[in-house]
Image: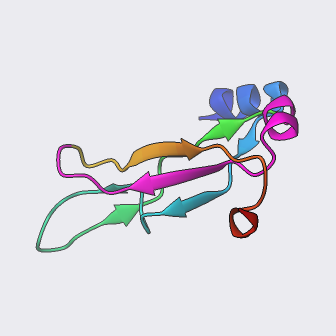
Amino acid sequence: MKQFQDVVSDCGFSDLSATGALFTWWNKHERDPIGKNLDRALVDRDWLRVFPYSQAHFKAGVISNHARCYVRIADRPAGNR
């Protein structure tokens, strides 16, 4: 994990703003359900310069225990369309 953190830091990556599912991973157990935020969308400064209003949207699915991630790209804030 330390090596991954070093790569993220060295490359200047940051988390893209996210919406959607409360958790990005869950164990799918009806008894003792566990949910965690394991998944993320990483971007660099150049991405944010070109797509400043982009967002990651996590949507729960039925096939995997991980949420699907869609990246929404917009040239202005969502309320100003």
53 vs 36, nearest the viewer: 53
- Direction front: furthest residue: 81
Left or right of 58 on screen, residue 63: left
Left or right of 45 on screen, residue 37: left
How far from the left and from the top, in percent, is residue 74? 70, 47
Residue at 48% x, 44% y: name it.
70
Residue at 44% x, 69% y: name it.
22
- Direction bottom: furthest residue: 31
51 vs 60, nearest the viewer: 51
- Up the image or down, 42 lies above or below 75; here it is above
How far from the left and from the top, in percent, is residue 21? 42, 64
Residue 17: quadrant of the picture:
bottom right
Residue at 14% x, 64% y: name it.
29
Quadrant of image for the C terminus: bottom right
**Colouring:** rainbow
20 vs 24, nearest the viewer: 20
- Up the image or down, 62 lies above or below 42; here it is below
Q: How many marks?
A: 0
How far from the left and from the top, in percent, is residue 58? 45, 54
Quadrant of image for the N terminus: top right
24 vs 78, nearest the viewer: 78
Residue 46: quadrant of the picture:
top right
Q: Is residue 47 magenta?
A: yes
Left or right of 45 on screen, residue 57: left
**Residue extent of the magenta highlight:** 45-63
How far from the left and from the top, in percent, is residue 28? 18, 60
